[in-house]
Image (cartoon, coloured by chain):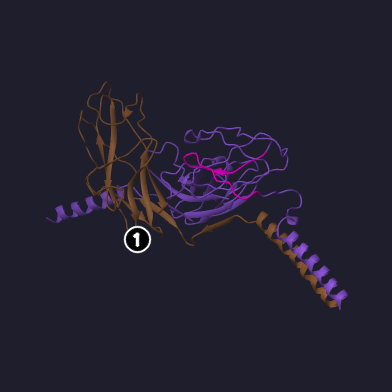
Amino acid sequence: MKLLLAVTVLGIAAGVLLTPAAALADFGIDPGKVFIDNLYPGAEADVPITIYNQNDYTTNFLISTRNPDYTENGYEPFPHTDWISIIPEQVTIDANQTADVLIVIIMPEDAQYSGKKAEGWISFKEQGEPGSSEMIQIEIVSRLLISTRVEAEIKPTVPSTSTIEPAEEIEPAQSEVITGQPTQKTEPTKLKDVPVQPTLEGGAEVGITAELGETETVSPEVEPGFPWLVGGPVLGLITVIGIIFILRWARQRT
Amino acid sequence: MKKKVVSVLAVSLLLLVCPVSQVLADTTADVTVTATPGSFVGISCDQTSHDFGSITASSTPNTGTGWATITNSSSVLIDITIGCNGWSGTTAWTYGAAGADTAQLNTSATNGGATGSSGAGLYDVTIPSGSSAMLCDGVAIGTNPAWEMQLAAPTSFTHGYTQTTTVTLTAAAG
């Protein structure tokens, strides 16, 4: 009986010792969700992310951009992953240590992605050992929720008498020809947000939001070399000159 | 009278200067980056692989309910999606609903939430190849879901080469 008990205990001990450690990929990242607002052509956003290697061994991590499995309400998958740089794309972290990576998002000067809300994912994975038979892999992502500034500028390089037509086609639902005046500035409306930003011949750009063929034009604005001369300041100056004349007139009368 | 003229001129100068500042502020508006402090996302799994062994046509062998546990160390609500990279082997099966040399994996889990698995042992979520499916939706802090897999074997075989796939569990802040 004692012999049987001893053999059983030895068997259990051997079984425990021979069972391979099964835990894998114990790591995390912070922050897991980042909002980047008001991104505009030429602008840069830097997002530092910390990787926590919670394994009891040194691990190499691979970082990359990828399309999201799903998106936040009102956001589309971010189509310009080429705007995102990851520094570095691989990092080796000692057991129970951390390391920072920097995510840099640069919107090109000539980008046509105004007034959009989009989501991109940054993927963090452990690099498996060569020849590893691991079938289950862990991936942790940081969600980047990006919104771009609404751009609607008229460049003053177009003759004021010319009629301009969009160089690129609008979506089929809005297949009618959209004509814009070069001195007009149209701004997006908040209908159901189907924004398009066609490039017009002659280098002018007009931001148009349209639904079912509708467009909305707002009061014209000019943006030449001295924008501060237009509007309030001119009226203010005229008012001041008027006051001076009235004062002079009053003085002469007295 | 001279004082009046001076003050009028001062006001006019202010009127001129103020709009200029506003325009400059508009053109230099900063990009804002907002991250919730301490929004840590981290998971691990206590299983690394499973061998279904020799299988027969049209069978549905499984790992057993509660086969693996995901340890959730996140400090925020998370979603867990699952996907795989298809079959590989000397001659690979096609990944998809059971057919000739065609098979797929199904899965289920606890804590499926609104859009994930309906419950343990149901194998109600197909693990897609090249994309992901929601397994656990809105996993609360400190909750560790258990999950399992099932193989929907081919209805017929033309060869007996070993097939492998890598299953990826992805955690994202909810």
Which residue corresponds to the image point at 28% horizontal and 22% vertical from the top-left? B159
Residue at 45% over, 51% down = A57
Q: Measured from the top left, where is residue B83 in percent x and y? A: 36, 40
In which quadrant of the rendered view does residue A207 lie?
top right
* Count of numbered marks: 1
- Who's brown, chain-wise? B
Give the magenta part as a residue range. Answer: A204-220
Amino acid type, mark 1:
Gly
| Vertical comparison of A32 with B93: above or below | below
Q: In x, y percent, where is residue A182?
A: 67, 41
For the residue pair A164 and B29, the one nearer the viewer reads as: A164
Instruction: Name the residue nearer the viewer: A74 or A44.
Output: A74
Chain letter matching colour purple: A
Can residue A214 be found in the magenta stretch?
A: yes
Q: The disc numbered 1 marks a residue on which chain?
A: B
- Magenta stretch, main secondary structure, is loop
Q: In which quarter of the image is the C terminus of chain A?
A: bottom right
Asked if one can make out residue A229 in the rendered structure from this viewpoint, the answer is yes
Mark 1 neighbour class, 10 Å CA radius: few under 14, some 14 to 19, many 20 or more:
few
Which residue lies at the image location 21% right of the left edge and 35% below the top edge?
Answer: B60
- Residue under circle 1? B142
